[in-house]
Amino acid sequence: MADPSSYRPKPGEIPDSPGVYRFRDEHRRVIYVGKAKSLRQRLANYFQDLAGLHPRTRSMVTTAASVEWTVVSTEVEALQLEYSWIKEYDPRFNVKYRDDKSYPYLAVTMNEEYPRVQVMRGHKKKGVRYFGPYAHAWAIRDTVDLLLRVFPVRTCSAGVFKNAARTGRPCLLGYIGKCSAPCVDRVSAEEHRELAEEFCDFMTGRTNTYIRRLEKQMAEAADEMEYERAARLRDDIGALKKAMEKNAVVLADATDADLIAVAEDELEAAVQIFHVRGGRVRGQRGWVTDKVEEITTGALVEHALQQLYGEETGDAVPKEVLVPALPDPVEPVQEWLAGRRGSGVSLRIPQRGDKKALMETVERNAQQALVLHKTKRASDLTTRSRALEEIADALDLDSAPLRVECYDISHLQGDDVVASMVVFEDGLARKSEYRRFQIKGFAGQDDVRSMHEVITRRFRRYLAEKEKTGEWTDGENPENAETPEMDRNGEIVATGPTEDDGRPKKFAYPPQLVVVDGGAPQVAAARRALDELGIDDIAVCGLAKRLEEVWLPGDDDPVILPRTSEGLYLLQRVRDEAHRFAITYQRAKRSKRFRSSPLDDVPGLGETRKQALLKHFGSLKKLRSATIDQICEVPGIGRKTAETIAVALARSAPAAPAVNTATGEIMEEEPGTMGSSGEPVATGTPDERRGQET
C-alpha cells in the first residue's frame, strides 16, 4: 500500500486551470481518470488526511503510485477527454455502468440500396436508423407486423432478397401485401426508399399526419363507391392505431425527451432511462454500477449522460433531458450535449405536471431495479464465495482463489494439437482474458508434454511482464524468464519496446490457482513447468473427467469433493469451459487444413485450373500418381507447370495412410470423400468423429 505523500506533486506544480488527471499504480496501469474545473483544487482533495477520505477513495489513492494531468482549454474539452480515456483505459476505480442485457432495437438500414427493417442488438452502425431500445424483441416484431400493412418495407435477409431477384418470384410477404417486393421490381429503389423514410417518420412520432391522410383517402374511396379499397384503408388505420396503442401517451404529442432517474445506496446505484418520442414511451433501459468513489447524484447523472450519448449524434440526442439532479457545473455538460445533437439541448429537473409524474414512475423503476439487482447479487455472491472457500479448504490454500486459470489440450488423432487457457475471476468467466496456443515444440500426440509446453510458455510470458513492470522483489531476472514475445495464439513474434500506455498486458496477472484438464500426469507436468521457472506461489490441481477426482501434485490419492459441493461444480464449469474453448479452436484449425491443398503452393495455378486437374483425375491421390505427360493432357496445363505440380505433390505426399482409430480401417481416398480442395476428409458419423477428439 502506497503512501499518497510519496507521489504528491510539489506546491505550485499543479496548474489552476481545467484539465483531466490520471492516477496510475506502481505498474503504470491507469486506475482512475477524472476531470476538474481547477486541477489544483481538485487534486488537493486527494492528498488530505486519509482518515477524512471516503473508504473507496482512500483505497484508490493508496493503490496509486503516481498522478499526471493534461491541461485543456475548456470544461467541455475536459468532459470529452475524460470520456475518451475512460473508454480507452477502463480504469478499475471509475464508475462503470453494468448493462446486464443487450437491448434490442428496431433498425432500418438506410445505408443500403433497398433499406431493410430488422431487429438489431449490439454496437450501432453508421447509416442505420435505430428506434428503441425495447425490453423484448417480440414487442418489435409485433409492431413491425402491424406497420407493414401501411409501409410494406423489405424485411428479408440479403440471401432471400438475391434468391427472389434471381428466380423472379417474391417471398410470401410480397404475395400477401406486407412487402412492396423491390426484389422483382414491383417498385423502384427510389419508391422503396420513400416507403422506408415514411416508416422512420412514423416511428419518430409523426403519427397523426399519416392517420389523417389515410382517413381522407378512405373517405374519398367511399364517396367513389370503391368500398374494397376503403375497407383496406380502414384496416390500415386500425393497424396503425393498434401499433400506437402499444406505447401509451404520457406527455404532450410533440414532446421528445429522455428521462433519467437514479436510485442509490452507499455502495451501488441503479440508473433507469425512459425514451419518450412524440409524447409516447418508445424504449426503456437500465444500468447498475458500483460506487467506487465518493460521488454525488449529479456526478452519477453526468456519468450516465456520457454512457448514454457518448457515441450518439443528431436526433439520437433528444431536445430535452430530464434528470433528478444536475451535474456541477451544468453548463459544460449542456454544451457537450448540444455539440452531439447539433442544436440546443435542455438539461433540467422536472418540477411539476406530467413530466414530474413520469419522473416519479422512472424513479420507482430505478428503485425496483436496485432491489432486484441486490437480491440477485447477494445470492450469486453467496454461492460463488462458498464455492471458492470450499476449493480453498479442499486444496489447503491460504486464501480463496479469486483468479483461476484452466488449461486443456485438444487434437484429432495427434493432428492440429492446440491448447486453451480460460480465466475465471470471482467465480465468473473473464472471456477477454482467454488465450489459445498451438503446440509446436514437438510433433505427435502427447498430452503431458503439451501441457508442460503450454504452462511454460504462459508463465514465461508472465515473468517477462514482471520484468518490464519492475515487479522483481530482488531486482534480478531469472535466466529461464527470458522469452520471445508471443501473440494470442502462442506464436512467437518479433520483440521490441512495449508502449507504456497504461493498459494491462495480456499475461500480466497471475492466477492463485491453475487447473488442468486431466489426472496426475498432467498435474505433475504443470507443476514441473512452474518449478522450472522458479514459481512456487501458484497452486496447481487437476480435474479428471471419469470420476471427477481432484488431483494435487505429488499426492498418490485424489481429493474427493462431494457431488453436491459448490466447489466441485465451479471446477467442473471451469474445466468444461476450457474444453469447449479448446475444441472450438481445434475444429477451426482442422477445417482450415481441410480446405487447403498442395496445389495452393503451385505458383501461377489458379482456381480454374486446379478444379480442372481434380475433375480430370478424380482425386488428389490419382493426380499425385500421374506422370508429367498425363498432367500435360489437362487443358491449360503446360509442361513447365506440370513439372511444378509434380514436385509440389511429391513434397506433400503422406508418409503413411490415415487410420480410423475407432474402427481400425485404412481411410482410402475416394471421389465421394474429398473436400473442396481435393484432400480426404474424415469419414464416419459426426458422433464417431467427435469421439476421436480430445
Image (tube, helix red, strand yellow):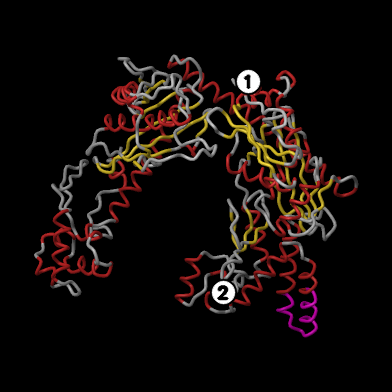
Q: Is residue 481 left or right of residue 471?
A: left
Q: Which is nearer the eye, 37 or 371? A: 37
- Point out residue 653 in the picture as x, y percentages from the top left corner: 15, 53
Q: How many marks?
A: 2
Residue 181: mark in rendering = 2
Vertical position of residue 597 compared to residue 499: above or below:
below
The quarter of the image holding the N terminus is top right
Task: Tell me the quarter of the picture where residue 356 sits.
Answer: top right
Count neighbours of disc 2 (C-alpha within 10 A) and say few if under 14, some if 14 to 19, many if 20 or more: many
Q: Alpha carbon of mark 1 to alpha carbon of mark 2: how far? A: 70 Å
Q: Is residue 173 left or right of residue 233?
A: left
Residue 3: mark in rendering = 1
Q: Which is nearer the eye, 339 or 613? A: 339
Amino acid type, residue under disc 1 in the picture: Asp
- Point out residue 285 in the picture as x, y percentages from the top left corner: 69, 46
The quarter of the image holding the C terminus is top left
